[in-house]
Structures are given as C-alpha cells and as structure tokens.
Image (spheres, rainbow, N blue to C red):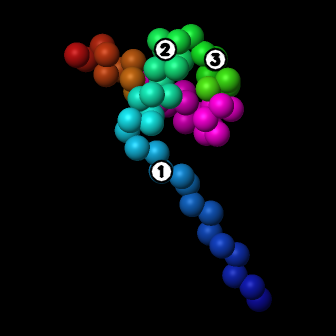
Amino acid sequence: MSKQAKSTRPVYNLEFKQDAAKLVIDKGYAHQQTADSLGVSLSAIGRWVRADNRNKINT
C-alpha cells in the first residue's frame, strides 16, 4: 500500500487577504475575476470581503 500525500490548505497572510478584498470593494472587480487572478478560491474571496466589510462597520 502506498501512502497518499495529505493535501494542505494554503495559508495567506492578513495583508494579502485585505488587498484581495480591496480589489472587490474599492476597485469594483468581480469576486470570480479576483479569485481567478490571484489563484484562490471564490469562497475565500467572499469570506475576506465580508470580513473587511465587518471591520469597516466596527471602526
């Protein structure tokens, strides 16, 4: 039996996430366009945009 390598989820730093969210929020890029350009999942972009919007409301 051969062992399969366990896939790991990529880790992105906070600055990368914030910059990605700004592309959607400030620059008007579509979520899918941003995800494709940066090589990340569409769901990740959605989470980062929601998190950024929550932070702006709280400050």
Residue 35 drawn at (x, y percent):
63, 31
Q: Is residue 10 left or right of residue 19?
A: right
The magenta region covers 35-50
**How many angstroms separate mark 2 from mark 1 (CA)?**
22 Å
Mark 3 = which residue?
Answer: 30
Query: CA separation, marks 2 and 3?
Result: 9 Å
Residue that carries the numbered disc 2 in the rendered image: 25
Dominant SS of magenta comes to helix
Residue 44 falls within the magenta-colored stretch? yes
Tell me if label 2 and label 3 are in contact, CB under 8 Å. no
Going from N to C along the chain, the mark reached first, 2 or 3, is 2
Query: Who is closer to the viewer here, 12 or 44?
Result: 12
Figure quadrant of residue 58 = top left
Q: Is residue 36 magenta?
A: yes
Mark 3 burial class by Cα count in 10 Å: few <14, some 14-19, many 20+: few
* Kind of residue at disc 2: Ile
Q: Amino acid at mark 3?
A: Ala
At label 1, which amino acid type do we have?
Val
At x 67% / y 23%, what residue is drawn?
33
Q: Position of residue 19 (x, y in %)?
A: 45, 28
Q: Residue at x 48, y 14 (%)?
A: 25
Q: At numbered mark 2, what does the secondary structure look like: helix, strand or loop?
A: helix
Q: Which residue is mark 1?
A: 11
How crowded pointer 1 is (Cα within 10 Å; few <14, some 14-19, many 20+) is rated as few
- For this view, does 58 lie left or right of residue 32? left
Residue 41, compared with residue 57, is above or below; it is: below
Q: Secondary structure at mark 1?
A: loop
